[in-house]
Image: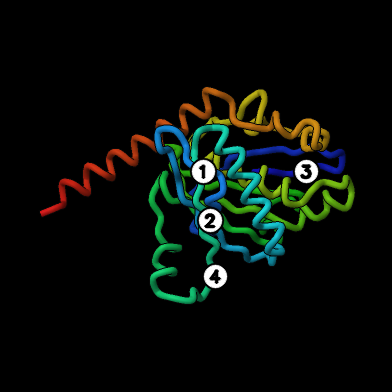
């Protein structure tokens, strides 16, 4: 979970419960990734985030994951979907290859400054995360934060929790337990990335899941 105090700090806590939410989009601009580590994220923009802010936020999150060796395919979903095929693709949930992200105005039941939360079971698996847009707008007004960049970093952090499992906070980088507003400035933003060990763990989890899925598909073939 991500929260902001009035002093410009962000606090992150992973909530170990499973909830059903979703969100989607696609950004093929980042190109191929070595070893073919990739995932799909369904994005549901229930907060009315402007299209350009959402696209730039997805691109920022893609950049962060690309540096970790992972390509993200965003599915920007609507309810109702324009076709049954699009609806089927958006609803698909497969851990860890297809995750869901939902953007809402604010949290219900959490502190008002909360910016995000990931949902996991006790074994550390989970496919759903929520982002809270209103506190991000508040930070833009108070500290001049770039909304798209903030959205992308919060999304990367919460998706990172889903891929890394429990106890996934770090002393530095995108998964650190708290950020200052200064760490999201243009001069420092390139340091807000996944650490080498985190990147390797996420890639291995995704690549293993891909291999298992491929083997299962071959086993089911006539």
Circle 2 — which element?
A: loop
Q: CA distance from mark 1 to mark 4?
A: 26 Å
In the rendered image, residue 210, in percent from the top left (x then y), is placed at 33, 41
Which residue was labeled with disc 4?
78
Give the camera-side residue of 158 and 13. 158
**If you read the primary sequence from the N terminus, does the residue marked by circle 4 or circle 3 appear first?**
3
Do we see residue 158 in this rendering?
Answer: yes
Q: Is residue 126 above or below residue 23?
A: above
Nearer to us of marks 4 and 3 is 4
Q: CA distance from mark 4 to mark 2?
A: 13 Å
Badge 3 density bin: few <14, some 14–19, many ≥20, Cα 10 Å: many
Circle 1 — which element?
A: loop
Nearer to us of marks 1 and 4 is 1
Q: CA distance from mark 2 to mark 1?
A: 12 Å
Q: CA distance from mark 1 to mark 3?
A: 33 Å
In the rendered image, residue 73, in percent from the top left (x then y), is placed at 49, 51
Checking the image for residue 26, the label placed there is 2
Q: Is residue 93 above or below residue 122?
A: below
Residue at position x 78%, y 33% in the image: 183
Looking at the image, the residue that sits furthest to the left is: 222
Q: CA distance from mark 4 to mark 3?
A: 29 Å
Which residue was labeled with disc 1?
31
Q: In terms of image quadrants, where is residue 103?
A: bottom right
């Amino acid at each position: 979970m991500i929260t902001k105090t009035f002093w410009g700090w962000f606090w992150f806590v992973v909530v170990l419960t499973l909830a059903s939410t979703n969100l989607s989009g696609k950004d093929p601009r980042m190109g191929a990734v070595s070893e073919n580590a990739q995932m799909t994220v369904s994005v549901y923009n229930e907060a009315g985030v402007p299209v350009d802010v959402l696209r730039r936020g997805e691109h920022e999150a893609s950049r962060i994951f690309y540096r970790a060796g992972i390509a993200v395919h965003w599915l920007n979903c609507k309810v109702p979907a324009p076709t049954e095929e699009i609806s089927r693709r958006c609803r698909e949930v497969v851990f860890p290859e297809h995750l869901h992200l939902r953007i809402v105005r604010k949290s219900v039941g959490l502190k008002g400054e909360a910016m995000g939360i990931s949902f996991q079971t006790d074994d550390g698996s989970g496919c759903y995360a929520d982002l809270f847009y209103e506190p991000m707008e508040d930070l833009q007004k108070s500290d001049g934060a770039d909304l798209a960049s903030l959205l992308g970093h919060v999304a990367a952090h919460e998706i990172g929790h889903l891929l890394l499992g429990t106890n996934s906070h770090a002393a530095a980088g995108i998964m650190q337990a708290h950020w200052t507003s200064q760490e999201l400035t243009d001069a420092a933003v390139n340091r807000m990335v996944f650490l080498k060990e985190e990147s390797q763990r996420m890639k291995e989890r995704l690549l293993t899941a891909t291999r298992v899925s491929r083997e299962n598909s071959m086993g089911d073939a006539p």
